[in-house]
Image (spheres, rainbow, N blue to C red):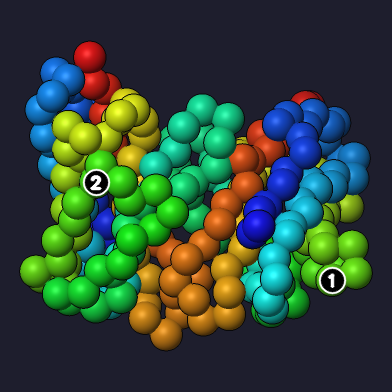
């Protein structure tokens, strides 16, 4: 079954601390992996995708096919990173995206 | 102001009534999507449309219907056959060549009593 699992509903860290939001997936083909973010009172938006291999707002995510994981990391969390984060996968070029349940990140001052 | 609009923000209906949620985009995107979001769950795909006059069922299409008569519009009807219609509904759109770069609307919270 195709599934995205985000094991943490809530993650709380102090400002300046490293943060890692976990994402594991099960998929039979070659998926594309994404992270979406929703800041308070804003719309859900794409944060980054694994094929871009880029860092957005200091966040990076590496696709580990052996562990079927796509964890989101940032070395030094900022208060403005507080948001809801969703991991998602889709088949390459496909229109059906599967979302995880989301992790709420709270960065404390 | 470009983007996706959904109306209304809040919608209340009595059980047994059909209700239609609006989604409009002026991004010139070919593809549009409807998701449902329930507490503690991720977004689940209801229907999607790759192009005008064409749409496909998502993972939870039962009890819902859509139409795509115009590129800009993708209304979702929640029918009385939908057993648990109370939820938060999100509409999205994307370029057809980049289906995974989805732009989301603000959502409509539907409450059925």
- In the picture, measured across the screen, residue B69 lies left or right of residue A60, that is left
Quadrant (top left/top right/bottom left/bottom right) for the C terminus of chain B: top left
Q: Which mark is residue A43?
A: none
Rendered residue at 73%/60% (across/down): A26
Task: Compare residues B4 and A64 and report the one nearer the observer.
Answer: A64
Residue B106 can be seen, yes or no: no
Tell me what residue is drawn at x 21 percent, y 35 percent: B81
Against A97, residue A65 (above or below) is: below
Q: Where is residue B51 in the image (x, y as percent from the top left)?
A: 24, 78
Mark 2, residue position: B64
In the visual, does B83 lie left or right of A5?
left
Residue, x 14% and y 61% (percent of image)?
B67
Q: In which quarter of the image is residue A33?
A: bottom right
Q: Position of residue B71 (x, y in %)?
A: 16, 72
Chain designation of label 2: B
Q: Residues within 10 Å of mark 2 (few under 14, many from 20)?
A: many
Task: State the residue position of label 1.
Answer: A65
> SS of the residue at dot 2?
strand
Q: What is the distance, in whole Å, between disc 2 and disc 1 at their CAs?
A: 36 Å
* Disc 1 packing (10 Å; few <14; some 14–19; many ≥20): few
Q: Is residue A76 above or below residue B47?
A: above
Whether the residues at callouts 2 and 1 have beta carbons within 8 Å, the answer is no
Give the image location of residue A96, x and y in percent: 47, 66
Foreground mark, 2 or 1, reads 2
């Amino acid at each position: 079954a195709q599934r995205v699992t985000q094991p943490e509903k809530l993650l709380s860290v102090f400002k300046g601390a490293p943060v890692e939001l976990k994402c594991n997936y099960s998929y039979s083909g070659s998926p594309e992996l994404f992270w979406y973010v929703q800041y308070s009172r804003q719309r859900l938006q794409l944060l980054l995708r694994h094929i871009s291999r880029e860092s957005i707002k200091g966040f990076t995510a590496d696709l580990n096919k052996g562990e079927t994981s796509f964890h989101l990391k940032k070395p030094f969390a900022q208060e403005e990173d507080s948001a809801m984060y969703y991991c998602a996968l889709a088949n390459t070029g496909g229109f059906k995206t599967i979302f995880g349940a989301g992790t709420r990140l709270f960065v404390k001052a | 102001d470009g983007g996706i609009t959904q109306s209304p923000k809040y919608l209340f209906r009595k059980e047994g009534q059909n209700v239609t949620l609006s989604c409009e985009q002026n991004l010139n995107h070919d593809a549009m999507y409807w998701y449902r979001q329930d507490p503690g769950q991720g977004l689940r795909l209801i229907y999607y449309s790759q192009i005008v006059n064409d749409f496909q069922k998502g993972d939870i299409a039962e009890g819902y219907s859509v139409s795509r008569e115009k590129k800009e519009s993708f209304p979702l009807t929640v029918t009385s056959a939908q057993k648990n219609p109370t939820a938060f509904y999100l509409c999205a759109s994307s370029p057809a060549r980049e289906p995974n770069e989805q732009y989301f609307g603000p959502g409509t919270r539907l409450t059925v009593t």
